[in-house]
Image (cartoon, grey):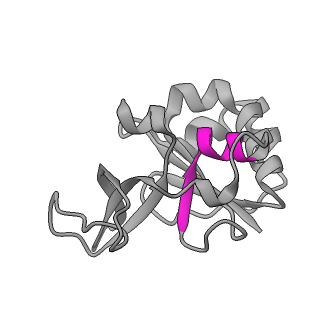
Amino acid sequence: MTRVLLVGSEEVDLRAELFSRETARDALATFQLREPYQNCLELETISVGSATSLLNDLNWYLVRFVDEALVLEPSISDDEWLSRKLAARVRDGDLEPAETDPLLKIYGVEKDESGTTLVEPMYVARTVDGVPEYDLREVDETMVVRVTEDEFRS
């Protein structure tokens, strides 16, 4: 199953905002939502195509309430997410799955008594030794996101 992760903006309650609007609520009604990180919603779809279609359907809300929409496709990687733009390029056939891995955005993951939180990301290029270490602060773990060249440069 392909997973989608919506990373909410800091200043909004993502679940409340999405479910207070009929169109978003209807689009999400068939999915079982989880909250793996504070102010994030995760759901499963059947493919990269259905994931990107859902994100397109929710675009009005994503622009307003979501900092990032990510897709995890097991046929590409079991543990590295794709940015929404990268997932769309794979779906459209503009990019082969094997070509998605050189440019990365790494989130730190902090765990404390209030929950698990994604913290400031850093952009890195994969090296011959693999994924560089997250060094912005001490974190419990990391979450790797593959990004497009445009996202990497911005």
Residue 17 lies in what quarter of the image? top right
Q: Residue 35, how many percent across, how many down?
A: 54, 62
Number of numbered tags placed on the structure image: 0
Residue 76 lies in what quarter of the image? bottom right
Q: Nearer the viewer, residue 126 or 138?
A: 126
The answer to whether 137 appears left or right of 35 in the picture is left
Q: Residue furthest front?
A: 128
Quick check: 127 above or below 63?
below
Q: Residue 92, how many percent across, how many down?
A: 79, 39
The answer to whether 4 appears left or right of 140 in the picture is right
78 inside magenta stretch: no
The answer to whether 8 appears left or right of 42 in the picture is left
Residue pictured at 63% horizontal, 38% vertical: 18
Q: The magenta stretch spans which residues?
A: 80-90
The answer to whether 103 appears left or right of 112 in the picture is right
Q: Quadrant of the C terminus?
A: top left
Residue pictured at 54% horizontal, 72% vertical: 79
Q: Nearer the viewer, residue 17 or 152?
A: 152
Quick check: 60 above or below 19?
above
Q: Nearer the viewer, residue 132 or 53?
A: 132
Residue pictured at 61% horizontal, 64% vertical: 34
Q: Residue 135, how many percent across, how many down?
A: 17, 62
Residue 33 lies in what quarter of the image? bottom right
